[in-house]
Image (cartoon, rainbow, N blue to C red):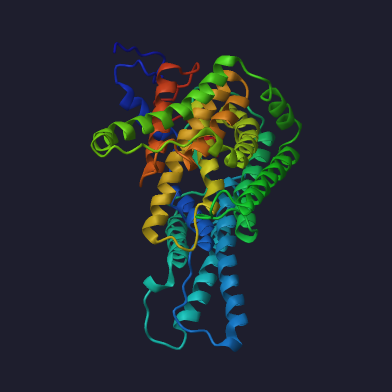
């Protein structure tokens, strides 16, 4: 493809090729100090740790059961508090966070780890971390990652000022307004995991087609609505005008796009399954399973959840992120926020260490794919309605595929959505979507 250069901007038609554009974009969404990623990883470990299994191998005497439960609950709460604290430090709208504040954020997790390890190994000389469970491992990994970053800050080799490279496609946004957006993001990331940890919401592996599932879905939708109202209160009147502006009815072509994308992905998977199964069906005379339309009616609560989430992420937050960071970076970062807000419901006590790492990676891929596709729909349609339809169908078809489910169908769907996002932004990209500065700029942007 013949490409051209213009004003130092990387476009998809440039001679350096798409790979160079992707590389420059990847550099633009990472902080200048890459070691700051260790603090983000520590926060993730702290936030998901309480949702995982914490295993005590010794038999607890009946008379000590209440005390042990209190100590274990205190340890898990301390780890969660560290996650909330570290999130606040890198989302705080000022650069006045100090070395001591970061150390104080990690201290509760350290105390929780000591308490839990003391319960298991108190009075014994044997030390083995493996039996303590993935929750303990996650908390310990978060503490070690946090201490690595703290050590670098103490030596002056890293900074608590989180800075991204400046994009050439960035618009203006009031500093005070962006500060309020940052505070709300912290509330979103910290409050949702706390509520899903303490309240009886939908858990991993809970059966569908049950009254409990419907009630859990409705409670999640009510929680999303409450979070939206908190966001409107924290951010101010401009958030109301944004939601109202994006709540209009879109053109028919974008409704068709919103339906065609998730259904097309599902049909593609079904077609490939059918073609592979065709020789066996021909020889055996069997039938290929197909889910009928009426069976999807039981999944209507997922549509309600999708609508609430689109109002929150695409209607409330996405316009601020695009104005602050430009289109592509804004969609990428809102995808990270979307992933962080869902981590608390992705895990249960039955997860192993390998499954935890795998699930975090898959959640990131899924969230980024969704963010770019749904964000594209909102930007092009100037309405959140197509995004809500596509998101709802994604949820339904993810839980009830057209053909037989198979191991790994989730990652396959996620990859296909990522490829769909690449197609949309490469051939149907809105203006200035690919603009990323080629070299560092002195006026970098604080997170």
The relative height of residue 70 versus residue 376 in the rendered view (above or below) is below
The relative height of residue 189 versus residue 326 in the rendered view (above or below) is below
Q: Position of residue 352 (x, y in %)?
A: 40, 61
Q: Is residue 444 visible?
A: no
The relative height of residue 428 versus residue 442 in the rendered view (above or below) is above
Q: Is residue 128 visible?
A: yes
The relative height of residue 146 versus residue 309 in the rendered view (above or below) is below
Quadrant the C terminus occupies: top right
- Residue at image coords 41%, 47%: 361
- Residue at image coords 43%, 26%: 264
Labels in figure, total = 0
Quadrant the N terminus occupies: top left
- Residue at image coords 29%, 16%: 15
Q: Position of residue 293 (x, y in %)?
A: 53, 33
Q: Quick check: 289 left or right of 106?
A: left
- Residue at image coords 72%, 45%: 226
Q: Quick check: 402 left or right of 256?
A: left
Residue nearest the observer in this picture, 154 or 337: 337
Q: Position of residue 193 (x, y in %)?
A: 59, 54
Residue nearest the observer in this picture, 226 or 99: 226
Q: Quarter of the image holding residue 194? A: bottom right
Residue nearest the observer in this picture, 6 or 413: 413
Instruction: Residue lying at the far front in this picture: please name it.
Output: 285
Q: Position of residue 296 (x, y in %)?
A: 55, 37
């Amino acid at each position: 493809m013949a490409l051209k250069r213009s004003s130092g901007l990387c476009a998809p038609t440039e001679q350096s090729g798409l790979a160079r554009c992707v590389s420059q974009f990847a550099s633009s969404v990472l902080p200048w100090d890459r070691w700051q990623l260790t603090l983000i990883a520590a926060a993730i470990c702290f936030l998901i740790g309480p949702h995982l299994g914490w295993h005590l191998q010794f038999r607890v005497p009946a008379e000590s059961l209440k005390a042990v439960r209190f100590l274990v609950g205190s340890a898990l709460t301390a780890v969660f508090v560290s996650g909330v604290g570290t999130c606040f430090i890198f989302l705080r709208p000022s650069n006045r966070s100090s070395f001591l504040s970061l150390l104080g954020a990690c201290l509760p997790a350290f105390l929780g780890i000591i308490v839990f390890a003391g319960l298991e190994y108190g009075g014994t000389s044997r030390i083995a971390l493996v039996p303590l469970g993935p929750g303990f491992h996650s908390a310990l990994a978060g503490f070690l990652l946090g201490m690595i970053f703290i050590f670098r800050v103490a030596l002056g080799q890293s900074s608590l000022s989180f800075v991204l490279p400046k994009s050439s496609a960035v618009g203006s946004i009031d500093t005070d307004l962006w500060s309020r957006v940052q505070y709300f993001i912290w509330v979103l990331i910290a409050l949702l995991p706390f509520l899903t940890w303490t309240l009886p919401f939908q858990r991993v592996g809970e059966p569908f087609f049950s009254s409990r599932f419907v009630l859990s879905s409705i409670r999640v939708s009510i929680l999303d609505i409450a979070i939206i109202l908190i966001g409107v209160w924290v951010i101010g009147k401009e958030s109301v005008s944004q939601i109202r502006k994006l709540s209009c009815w879109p053109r028919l072509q974008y409704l068709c796009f919103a339906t065609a994308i998730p259904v097309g992905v599902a049909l593609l998977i079904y077609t490939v399954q059918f073609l592979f199964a065709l020789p066996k069906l021909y020889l055996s005379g069997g039938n290929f399973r197909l889910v009928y339309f009426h069976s999807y009616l039981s999944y209507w609560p997922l549509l309600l959840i999708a609508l609430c989430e689109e109002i929150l992420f695409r209607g409330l937050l996405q316009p601020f992120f695009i104005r602050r960071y430009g289109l592509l970076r804004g969609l990428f970062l809102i995808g990270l926020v979307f992933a962080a807000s869902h981590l608390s419901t992705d895990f249960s006590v039955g997860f192993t260490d390998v499954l935890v790492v795998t699930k975090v990676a898959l959640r990131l891929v899924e969230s980024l794919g969704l963010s770019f596709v749904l964000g594209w729909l909102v930007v092009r349609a100037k309405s959140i309605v197509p995004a809500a339809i596509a998101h709802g169908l994604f949820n339904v078809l993810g839980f009830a595929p057209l053909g037989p489910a198979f191991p790994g169908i989730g990652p396959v769907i996620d990859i296909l959505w990522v490829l769909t996002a690449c197609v949309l932004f490469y051939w149907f990209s809105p203006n200035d979507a690919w603009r990323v500065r080629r070299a560092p700029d002195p006026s970098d942007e604080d997170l």
